[in-house]
Image (spheres, rainbow, N blue to C red):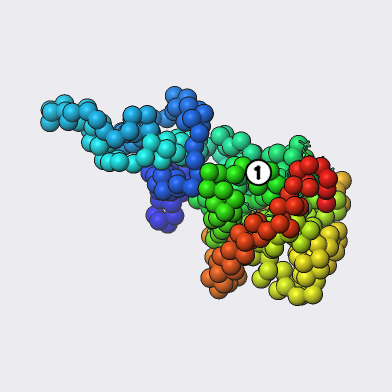
Amino acid sequence: MAHLAWRLAQRWCPSSLQVISFPVVQLHLNRTAMRASQKDFENAMNQVKLLKKDPGNEVKLKLYSLYKQATEGPCNMPKPGVFDLINKAKWDAWNALGSLPKETARQNYVDLVSSLSSSLESSSQVEPGTDRKSTGYETLMVTSEDGITKIMLNRPTKKNALNVEMYHEIMHALKAASKDDSAITVLTGNGDYYSSGNDLTNFTDIPPGGVEEKAKNGAILLREFVGCFIDFPKPLIAVVNGPAVGISVTLLGLFDAVYASDRATFHTPFSHLGQSPEGCSSYTFPKIMSPAKATEMLVFGKKLTAGEACAQGLVTEVFPDSTFQKEVWTRLKAFAKLPPNAMRISKEIIRNREKEKLHAVNAEECSVLQGRWLSDECMNAVVNFLSRKSKL
Ligand SMILES: CCCCCC/C=C/C(=O)SCCNC(=O)CCNC(=O)[C@H](O)C(C)(C)COP(=O)(O)OP(=O)(O)OC[C@H]1O[C@@H](n2cnc3c(N)ncnc32)[C@H](O)[C@@H]1OP(=O)(O)O
């Protein structure tokens, strides 16, 4: 009983939640894949001023040291005397960052502020079900309510095509959702599309190292991105509000449930684009729907209706578009009331024995795609789309 009381206190007492939030801060500090722009950095500096709670001296020193490193580089001040306690603590914190590059310090600062904003916001949450909106995302809307973290793709005018920023932001949102206090996580799209897949303009921004470097970087990003779905620890549900194309379809094989509007379609036109399957679909689709049906989709680019996708096991259930949102969210709210640890553990039992295999498949698919991106077939398809000569 005392144990239960302690756990309840830990759940609701803001000061103990501050302690819980610390590993989240660490997690964000370890994330180096995203690159913060000067604008992100300035936004983060403004956000610090808006924090409603004092984050404590340890965090303030970390913020100070990252700020100095990001703006001035390695510590360049003479060491204060032992009795100058405050300046000595600040000097120690800055000096401890050694030769950490300015860009990394800037990114770590932005991550730290972002994690502080969400952890301190959640510590002031008094009632379950209070809506929590994330800020700082350019391409997503992320909310946490009723035990559900909802990650909404938010580029409706581009049919929610996934640009490089969106890949990074989804990874960030998934990592945050895996640590937050929600029971389940949902991915959905804003507007009439779920997602039109990879943003084909991703192929246009060629770095100094040329197309080879571009393809290599793309493969690294894709592998990390898909890896986040393979490793996601809580029930992950897709609410497919409209047509889905390319990678937004292949990833569905890594979700725990897929609910679709009857307006949704499922299209993986990889051969048309001179590309090859990703998102582990070369492994998950044949298992889900038989090798021949997977071939129709992944090799011949057959577009499925929601009903067909459901009959083939890719979609869990289809709802009429007119009642889709209401019916699905009612159901998800009921799921989110189930004991979260039991759900997490059950997911682990269902998925874990496949994890190693999925990571190996992911690595292989990315390596094959890296080669495909350099092919004439792929380059022509991208040029045709961008010059408005072709559409799916
Ligand atoms: C790090 C790299 C990882 C890569 C992973 C590999 C992933 C592979 C894939 O996902 S393959 C699938 C790629 N997707 C496509 O080929 C879809 C291309 N889009 C279309 O064919 C059409 O836009 C459509 C059928 C999705 C929708 O047609 P329509 O309803 O007529 O709308 P518009 O074409 O007018 O679209 C509106 C607006 O959005 C832009 N847009 C839509 N999809 C994409 C896209 N995938 N990439 C870039 N831009 C896209 C479109 O250009 C319009 O923009 P505009 O208003 O003209 O500025």
Identify which residue is drawn at 66% across, 60% down: 372
The foreground one among 72 and 206 is 206
Which residue is at a point 74% across and 40% down the rendered structure image? 158
Residue depicted at 58% across the width and 67% down the height: 364
Q: Position of residue 383 (x, y in %)?
A: 74, 47
Query: In terms of image quadrants, where is residue 287?
Result: bottom right
For the N terminus, the image quarter is bottom left
Question: Mark 1 packing: few (<14 Cα in 10 Å), some, or many (20+)?
Answer: few
Q: In the drawing, does residue 273 fall left or right of residue 146?
A: right
Q: Secondary structure at mark 1?
A: loop
The vertical placement of 312 against 322, above or below, is: below
Q: Quadrant of residue 2?
A: bottom left
Is residue 361 at all visible to an observer of this figure?
yes
The image position of residue 342, as x and y in percent, is 56, 63
Q: How many marks?
A: 1
Q: Is residue 360 above or below residue 326?
A: below
Left or right: 340, with 199 as reference point:
left
Left or right, residue 169 beside residue 299:
left
**Nearer the observer, 126 or 295:** 295
What is the three-letter code of the residue carrying label 1? Thr
Residue located beneath label 1 in the image: 204
Q: Depth check: give the residue in front, 389 or 127.
A: 389
Residue 32, given in percent of the width and then of the height, sits at: 45, 46
Q: Quadrant of residue 281?
A: bottom right
Q: Position of residue 316 (x, y in %)?
A: 76, 62
The answer to whether residue 239 is seen in the rendering is: no
Give the camera-side residue of 53 and 390.
390
Q: Is mark 1 within 8 Å of ligand 1?
A: no
* Residue at 56% across, 65% down: 363
